Image (cartoon, rainbow, N blue to C red):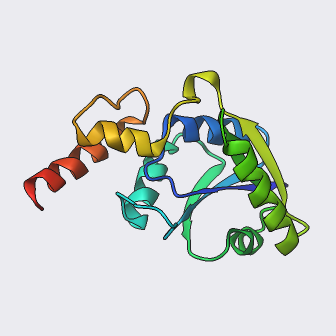
Amino acid sequence: MIKALYPGSFDPITNGHIDIIKRASSIFDSIVVGIFDHPNKNLLFTPQERLELARCSIAHMTNVEVHVYSTLTVEFARAIGARVMVRGLRIGPDFEQEFEITLMNKTMDFGLETVCLITSAENQFIRSSTLKDIAVLNGPVDKFVPACVARALREKYAQHKSGV
C-alpha cells in the first residue's frame, strides 16, 4: 500500500489543488493532504480554518484525509508513513522551486520520492494569492474554488471590512 503526502499551505484550497488531489488519489492507495500550520506567508485563514475548508472540499474522496502539521515536511511524511510526496506544477517558476525542494528533501530523507503532476490547463493560472486579491474586492471566485471556500472567503473579507 502506497501512501502519499500532498503538502502545502492551502490558504485557501483551490480547484487546482482539488484536481491534483483527485488525480493523485487515483494513483496512490491513500493521500494525506498536509496543511503546514505556519508557512512563511501572509495567511488569511487559521490552520483550523484551512483544515476545515480542505475537509469540506474533499469530503467525497474516500482515500484522502487532511491533517495540520508543524514539523519539517519530510519528518511529517515519515511520521505518517508516506513514501511519496505529491507536488503540482504550473507554468512558470514552479519547476525550479519544486526541483530545489525535492533535492533538499532528498538530503534529509532518501526514502521519500517526489511525484510532480502537471496542473490541468484550466487550472494553470489559479493561485491562492490571486484569489484573495479578487475576493477582497468582492469579485467572483466561485469558479476557482469549492463552494465552501467561496463562502468562507466572502465571510472573512466581510469581517475585515466591518472591523471584526
Q: Quadrant of the N terminus?
A: bottom right
Instruction: Name the quadrant containing residue 105.
Output: bottom right
> How many marks overall?
0
Residue 128 percent location from the top left of the image = 45, 44
Q: Please say if 50 is above or below 88.
A: below
Foreground pick, 24 / 12: 12
Question: Seen from this angle, which residue lies furthest left?
Answer: 162
Could you tell me residue 49's position as x and y percent?
37, 60
Q: Is residue 86 visible?
A: no
The residue drawn where x is 79% and y is 52% is: 99
Q: Is residue 13 above or below residue 72?
A: above
Instruction: Evaluate whether residue 111 shows in this view.
Output: yes
Residue ranking furthest to the right: 110
Q: Residue at x 22, y 35 (%)?
A: 138
Classify 132 as above or below 81.
Answer: above
Apparent side of residue 124 relative to residue 159 in the rendered image (left or right): right
- Image quarter where the C terminus lies is bottom left
Name the residue located 86 percent from the left edge and 71 percent from the top edge. 107
Q: Position of residue 143 (x, y in %)?
A: 40, 26
- Horizontal and vertical percent position of residue 52: 41, 56
Q: In screen coordinates, is 150 left or right of 73?
A: left
Q: Give the camera-side residue of 60 and 114.
A: 114
- Residue found 50% across the figure and 45% down from its top: 59
For this rendering, which residue is in front, 95 or 49? Answer: 95
